[in-house]
C-alpha cells in the first residue's frame, strides 16, 4: 500500500506520513475533476466534508460528526480556542515544557495580553512523573491545560485522564493537540473529555499537508470563530439565497471550520486516509508498532542508549537518548550511511514507526546505533 523504496528505512511518521498508493489515485481523480467545473454540484461542497468528519468522529469514538471542524493547521485550531477564552490578571495556563510551537505561541499571546502566567512544566529530575508534576501546578487560577497525549520530541506519554480530571476539578479547560498520537495511539476520549482535540492531518492521520481536523466540545458551541465565513452558516447549501445574510451557524463545531472548507482536493484524500485507519483500527496499529520494536528496545538499552519506559512509553513514537557524553553529530552520517530516516529532537533521536515499517528498518537502525557506540 506504500511505495517507500526497499533500501529506504523511513521511521519518521512523526515528521510526515508517506501517502498511501490508493490516495494518489484519489488525488489524481479529484484534480482532474477540477478541469470540469460544470460537473461540480452543490452537494460537492458538503458531502465530502461530512464524510471526513464522520470518519474522524469514528476514529475518536464520538457519535456526532458535527462536533468536528476542518482546519488548515493546528495553529488555526488553537487560535479558535484562545480567542474564546476569558482570562484575567493572575490566572495561569499550564502546558508541558518544550511543546510544539503551535501549542505555545497562542498561549504566550493570551497570557501577554491578559497579564496571565504561562506555566511550562519541566520534566522532573526526581522520582515524580512528568504527569504528576503537571497536576501539581494546576490550581483554582488555572484557565486551561493545553498539551499533547505524547510529547512531540521524545514521545513521553502523559497520563491524560488524570491530568484532565485535575483540570476539570479546578474548572480549567482541557485543550489537547493530538497531532502526534491520534491515529496511532488510542485517545481515551471518555476519560479525558477534552474541550478541544486538535490534529494536523499529515502525520498519524496519514493525510496530505495543510488540512487537519479538530473536535470542539460543548464549551465552544456558542462562541465566536476567528473568521466569519458563509459556508458555516445555516442554510448555506441554498446558494440562491446566500445574500439573505444568516446570523445562525450550523450546529456544534461547524463554525470553526476554515473558509473554503470544501477543499475539493485535500478533503477526499484525508477522508480516505482516515477511513483506512478505521479499517486497520488504531489499537492494531499501536500493537503492530509494539510487536515490531519488542526485540530491539532491550538491545538498544544494552548498547547504552536510554529510552522512556513503563507508562510513559509509546511504541509509535519514542526517543532514544544517546549514551552519556556522546555527541549526536557523528551519529548523523552513520544513519545516512544505513539510509535510516529519523529526526533529531533535543538530546534524543526520535523514532516513529508505522505499519509500513518492518524488521529490516529496525535492523538498519540498530546497525547504525551499534556502529556509533563502537566508534
Ligand atoms: C505536536 C505537533 N503539533 C502541531 C504540529 C504542526 O502544527 P501546524 O499545523 O500549526 O503547523 C506539529 C508538527 O510537527 C507537531 O509535532
Image (cartoon, rainbow, N blue to C red):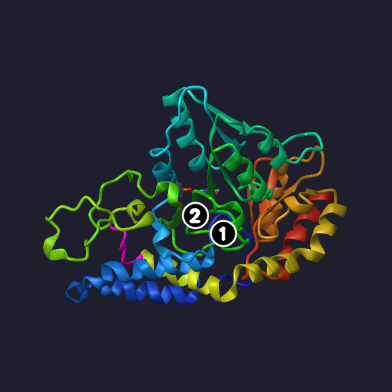
Query: The magenta stretch spans which residues?
Result: 260-265
Dominant secondary structure, magenta: loop
Question: Of label 1 and label 2, which has the lower sequence position?
Answer: 1
Q: Position of residue 343 (x, y in %)?
A: 62, 51
Residue pointed to by mark 2: 199
Q: Is residue 231 left or right of residue 281?
A: left
Disc 1 and disc 2 in contact, CB within 8 angstroms:
yes
Q: Where, quadrant-wise, is the N terminus in this rendering?
A: bottom right
Q: Is residue 106 left or right of residue 323?
A: left
Residue pointed to by mark 1: 182
Q: Position of residue 218 (x, y in %)?
A: 44, 51
Residue at the image point whose x is 44% and y is 46% from the top? 219
Q: Position of residue 181 (x, y in %)?
A: 59, 56
> Which disc is residue 143 wearing?
none
Q: Is residue 55 left or right of residue 118?
A: left
Quadrant of the rendered structure where residue 113 is? top left
Is ligand 1 within 8 Å of the beta carbon of the residue shown at mark 2?
A: no
Quadrant of the rendered structure where residue 279 is? bottom right
- Whole-number angstrom distance, CA of label 1 to CA of label 2: 7 Å
Q: Is residue 52 magenta?
A: no
Residue at the image point whose x is 65% and y is 68% from the top? 283
Residue at the image point whose x is 16% and y is 64% from the top? 239
Amino acid at each position: 500500500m506504500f511505495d517507500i523504496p526497499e533500501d529506504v528505512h523511513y521511521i519518521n511518521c512523526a515528521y510526515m506520513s508517506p501517502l498511501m498508493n490508493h490516495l494518489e489515485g484519489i488525488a489524481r481523480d479529484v484534480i482532474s475533476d477540477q478541469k470540469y467545473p460544470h460537473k461540480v454540484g452543490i452537494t460537492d461542497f458538503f458531502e465530502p466534508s461530512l464524510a471526513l468528519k464522520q470518519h474522524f468522529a469514528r476514529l475518536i469514538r464520538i457519535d456526532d460528526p458535527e462536533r468536528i471542524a476542518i482546519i488548515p493547521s493546528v495553529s488555526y485550531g488553537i487560535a479558535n480556542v484562545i480567542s474564546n477564552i476569558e482570562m484575567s490578571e493572575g490566572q495561569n495556563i499550564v502546558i508541558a515544557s518544550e511543546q510544539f510551537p503551535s501549542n505555545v505561541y497562542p498561549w504566550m499571546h493570551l497570557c501577554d495580553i491578559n497579564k496571565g502566567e504561562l506555566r511550562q512544566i519541566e520534566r522532573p529530575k526526581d522520582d515524580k512523573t512528568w504527569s504528576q508534576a503537571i497536576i501539581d501546578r494546576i490550581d483554582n487560577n488555572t484557565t486551561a491545560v493545553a498539551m499533547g497525549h505524547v510529547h512531540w520530541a521524545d514521545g513521553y506519554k502523559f497520563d491524560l485522564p488524570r491530568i484532565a480530571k485535575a483540570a476539570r476539578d479546578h474548572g480549567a479547560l482541557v485543550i489537547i493537540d493530538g497531532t502526534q498520537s491520534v491515529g496511532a495511539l488510542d485517545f481515551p476520549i471518555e476519560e479525558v473529555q477534552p474541550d478541544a482535540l486538535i490534529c494536523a492531518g499529515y502525520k498519524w492521520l496519514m493525510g496530505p499537508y495543510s488540512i487537519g481536523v479538530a473536535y470542539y466540545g460543548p464549551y465552544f458551541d456558542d462562541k465566536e470563530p476567528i473568521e466569519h465565513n458563509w459556508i458555516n452558516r445555516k442554510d448555506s447549501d441554498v446558494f440562491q439565497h446566500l445574500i439573505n445574510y444568516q446570523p445562525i451557524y450550523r450546529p456544534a463545531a461547524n463554525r470553526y471550520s476554515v473558509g473554503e472548507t470544501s477543499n475539493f482536493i485535500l478533503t477526499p484524500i484525508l477522508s480516505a486516509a482516515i477511513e483506512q485507519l478505521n479499517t486497520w483500527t488504531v489499537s492494531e496499529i499501536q500493537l503492530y508498532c509494539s510487536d515490531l520494536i519488542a526485540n530491539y528496545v532491550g538491545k538498544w538499552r544494552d548498547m547504552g542508549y536510554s529510552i522512556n519506559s513503563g507508562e510513559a512509553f509509546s511504541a509509535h513514537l519514542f526517543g532514544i537518548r544517546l549514551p552519556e557524553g556522546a555527541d549526536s553529530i557523528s551519529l548523523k552520517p552513520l544513519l545516512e550511511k544505513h539510509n535510516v530516516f529519523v529526526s533529531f529532537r533535543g538530546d534524543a533521536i526520535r523514532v516513529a514507526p508505522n505499519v509500513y515499517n518492518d524488521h529490516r528498518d529496525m535492523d538498519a537502525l540498530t546497525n547504525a546505533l551499534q556502529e556509533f557506540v563502537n566508534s
